[in-house]
Image (spheres, rainbow, N blue to C red):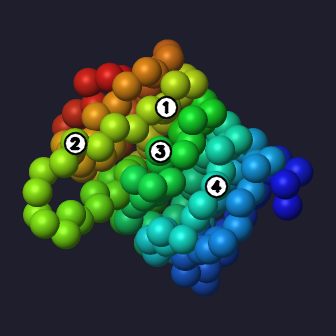
Amino acid sequence: MQNLELLDVQWCPSIGVAFDLEGLLWKGISDMALPSLKKDNSPGIQGFQNLRSLKVNGCGSLINLLSYTLAKLLVKLQDIEVTECGGMEAIIANEPNANDEVIIKIIMFPQLKKLKFRNLPNLESFCSRTYKFEESLLKTVEVSNCPKLKTLPPAF
C-alpha cells in the first residue's frame, strides 16, 4: 500500500470507524475522501505523512475528524474540507490528559492552504484551546452554516 495515492469511500453508513488502521504505515497516500463514514476515529493510525487533501462529506455520526496523534503527522496536508456532517463537534479531538493538567500541544500544518466547513450544525471548534498551531500558509477559509462555531485558532 506504499503507492496508494487516493482513498475514496462514499456513502457507507454502516462503516463504524474512520481510521482503524492499526499497524499500517501508508507512506504513499496523497489524497483521501471519506464521504458518509460513521462514528469516531481510532488512535491506532501510524501514518498518512503524504496526505495532501482530506475531504469528508455526509458522515452524520462522525464527532471528530482527527485525533491529535494523527493531526501532528499530516505535515503535507494542503486542504481540509468537511461538509454535511451533522454530528461533527470538533475537527481535532480533545484528548484527555491522565493528570487533568493543561498541556499545550503544538500542531503544525506547514502546507495547509484551504479550509472549508459547510453545514456542520454542531461544530463548536476546530480544536481544543490546549492546541497551538504554528506555520500555516492558509489562504482560503470558507465557513457556511456552522452556527455554533465561534472562532478558529489564531495561527489561521
Q: Position of residue 121 (x, y in %)?
A: 32, 54
For marks 1 and 3, the one nearer the N-term is 3
Looking at the image, is 10 positioned above or below residue 4?
Answer: below
**Tag 1 residue:** 109
Label located before the other in sequence (2 or 3): 3
Give SS at disc 4: loop
* Tag in front: 4 or 1: 4
Residue holding disc 2? 104
Are there few (<14), some (14-19), or many (20+) residues within 10 Å of tag 2?
few
- Residue 4: x and y, percent? 84, 53
In primary-sequence order, the first of circles 4 and 1 is 4
| Marked residue nearer the N-terminal end (4 or 2) | 4
Residue 83 place in picture, x, y as percent = 50, 49
Residue 106 visible in this rendered orientation of the protein: yes
Residue type beneath disc 2? Ile
Quadrant of the rendering where the C terminus is positioned: top left
Please, what secondary structure does the residue beneath circle 1 have? loop
Q: Which residue is drawn at 56% across and 42% down?
A: 74
List the residue tagged with mark 4: 47
How many numbered marks are there?
A: 4
Residue shown at 61%/79% (left/top)? 15
Kindly report the distance in space between the C-alpha atoms of the residues bearing marks 4 and 1: 15 Å
Mark 4 is surrounded, within 10 Å at the Cα level, by few (under 14), some (14 to 19) or many (20 or more) other residues, namely many
